[in-house]
Amino acid sequence: MKNEELDQLFKEQLADKEISPPSFIWDKIEKELAPKHKINWIRYAAILAIIFSSALTIFFVKNTKTLSSPEKNMDDKISNLAMLDNKITKETTSAEAPLKKTEHLPENIIKNSDVSQDKTQNKVSSSAYKVKARETFSTRQTIHIEEPLVENNLKELTKNTGHQPLITYHMVEAGPIQSLISFPEQEDNMLASLATSEDEALPPLINKIIDKIRPTDRETPIKVSKDNEGSIQIDFKNIFAKNKNKNKRNK
Amino acid sequence: MEKDSLDKIWGACLRRSRKAQFELYQLFSKKMFAICIRYTESEQEAEDVLQIGFLKVFTNCHDYKGNGSLEGWIRRIIINTALEFHRKNKYTFTNNADEHLQSIISSQETHHPIYYKDLLSLVKTLPLGYRTVFNLAIIEGYSHKEIAIMLSISEGNSKSQLSRARLWLKEKLISIENINS
């Protein structure tokens, strides 16, 4: 057999043959072509953003609940007082009668109250009163005990007698509230251990969100759980192990 | 394959269209897989070469400047990938040639003419160095100069390996025919 014959035989038989490769090869190629790392980083960033934002909102919601509630009550009281005061002023001006008025107000309030027309007509400027009241609340805890049905009484009195009604404020002064815990840094720990039902539901919720975001990455799970002290901890095991294994395999 | 539609597919491949990439793969994967099989030791390895080769085609698609046919360029990439595999795995030149030959002889007992599969098995019995040069020179039709560059060997080495490969194949063919006759 000559060289040319041999070459011809092999070339004819072997060149330009077609054999179908298994279909999974394309799947592999497609997987490799996908911009995997980019997506992964976006995913991780999204997860972190969600966790931090939820943590922040929870933190602020809790803080505002505990801090703002007494202040709000105080504001309510003040506005109630102001309304009442306005009414009193109206009544007194319409009555236009000299009156005897006794007030058991705290001294500082009386001093600062705005006396406008008469000494007998004790018109208390609502704005000044309000400001003063706010100061009082901020410096010390003041509790107003208002007479029930003051408004009704006032109306009846003015109708029947045409005289300025007698208004009585009972004020009880209390000293500043003492904190129960002597060391504020211990307070945090104590609060953290008071796990409410709201807190218990949080880690599973975050886990569900994470599962939704990255459903395929079962081998590198990111889990959120609660530790003994009530803090939320994030476990991401093997998050970078994928690449490591790949490099090893290639070698 | 009409040239226009191939150009269209390739243009879309340059824009990283997944659909076009799949079409290109459909067009050439069969031919390229046959080439992979000739150069590799096992089917598993051929699959790996095909996968990595096509990935290179898609990721380095902008390297194709239009010199020569697209198929030739893809083939060159596939072959280079196979040669890289050889280098990486540092194959020794000893292999189980006799076993292969035995299977060919047994298949010949039914007196079928020598066709693709038999010749393929025969080429696969060649030691790796001979086989690679034989594949490149005879079947792919590269010149000894090109082969020397691709394998980083001398031109003379390429020529001598080819003549030894031919000699080996002739011997095997004769022995098969003797058994059959």
Image (cartoon, rainbow, N blue to C red):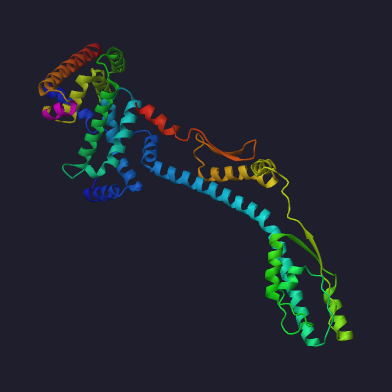
Q: Residue A230: x, y in percent?
A: 64, 40
B10 relative to A17, above or below: below
Q: Main secondary structure of the magenta part?
A: helix
Residue A99 placement, left or right of A37: right
Image quadrant containing the N terminus of chain B = top left
Residue at 76% in and 84% down: A118
Residue A69 placement, left or right of B91: right
Give residue B179's quadrant in the image. top left
Q: Residue A249: x, y in percent?
A: 38, 27
Q: Residue A158: x, y in percent?
A: 85, 83
B87 relative to B95, above or below: below
Residue A19 in sight in this render: no
Image quadrant containing the C terminus of chain B = top left
Point out the stretch of residues depicted in magenta.
B145-151
- Asked if the stretch drawn in magenta spans residue A48, the answer is no
Residue B45 in sight in this render: yes
Residue at 65% in and 43% down: A188
Q: Residue A159: x, y in percent?
A: 86, 85
Give residue A80's quadrant in the image. bottom right
B96 relative to A216, above or below: above
Residue A148 placement, left or right of A191: right
- Asked if the stretch drawn in magenta spans residue B147, the answer is yes
| Nearest the eye: A119 or A70 | A119
B84 relative to A93, above or below: above
Residue at 75% in and 72% down: A110
- Residue at the extreme right: A160
Q: How many marks?
A: 0
| Nearest the eye: A237 or A177 | A177
Give residue B154's quadrant in the image. top left
| Nearest the eye: A35 or B36 | A35
